Image: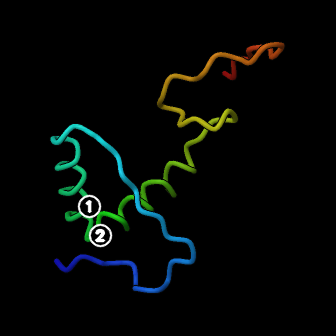
C-alpha cells in the first residue's frame, strides 16, 4: 500500500511538531499511520480532526478525565 502524503505546498501555515514520548508509543503511532496509508503528518492531522468530534463542552475528549470546575462554576452532571 502506498502511503498518501499531503501534497506539497497545500499547507497555508505549517509548523514543525516536536514531542518527547515513549519510543514504543512513537513506533506504534508510525505503524498505525502506515497501516492507514497515511504519512505521520497526515495521520496526526486526521487524528486531531477526529478528536474534535469527541470533545465535551469543556473542550476535553470525552474519554479523558474532565477538569475540575473553575471558581464560581457549578458542576453539572449530564446523564
Q: Residue at x 70, y 35 (%)?
A: 57
Q: Is residue 63 left or right of residue 56?
A: left
Q: Residue at x 51, y 58 (%)?
A: 49
Instruction: Give residue 39's quadrant in the image.
Output: bottom left
Q: For mark 1, give the secondary structure.
A: helix
Above or below 70: residue 38: below
- The quadrant the N terminus occupies is bottom left
Above or below 40: residue 28: above
Tell me whether the residue at label 2 lies in contact with that at label 1, contact meaning CB atoms closer than 8 angstroms. Answer: yes
Q: Is residue 74 left or right of residue 34?
A: right
How far apart, in angstroms, are the residues tagged by discs 2 and 1?
5 Å
Could you classify mark 1 by the number of other residues whose Cα lies within 10 Å: few (under 14), some (14-19), or many (20 or more)?
A: many
Above or below 49: residue 79: above
Mark 2 sits on what residue? 38
Q: Position of residue 28 (x, y in %)?
A: 19, 48
Q: Residue at x 49, y 83 (%)?
A: 10
Q: Position of residue 54 (x, y in %)?
A: 55, 43
Q: For mark 2, give the secondary structure.
A: loop
Q: Position of residue 59 (x, y in %)?
A: 64, 38
Looking at marks 2 and 1 on the same chain, the residue that comes earlier in the sequence is marked by 1
Could you classify mark 2 by the number of other residues whose Cα lies within 10 Å: few (under 14), some (14-19), or many (20 or more)?
A: many
- The quadrant the C terminus occupies is top right
Mark 1 sits on what residue? 33
Q: Position of residue 38 (x, y in %)?
A: 29, 69
Amino acid at each position: 500500500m502506498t502511503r498518501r502524503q499531503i501534497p506539497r505546498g497545500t499547507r497555508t501555515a505549517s509548523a514543525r511538531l516536536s514531542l518527547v514520548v515513549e519510543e514504543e508509543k512513537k513506533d506504534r503511532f508510525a505503524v498505525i499511520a502506515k497501516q492507514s496509508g497515511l504519512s505521520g503528518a497526515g495521520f496526526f492531522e486526521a487524528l486531531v480532526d477526529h478528536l474534535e468530534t469527541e470533545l465535551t463542552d469543556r473542550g476535553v475528549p470525552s474519554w479523558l478525565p474532565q477538569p475540575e470546575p473553575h471558581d464560581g462554576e457549578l458542576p453539572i452532571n449530564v446523564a
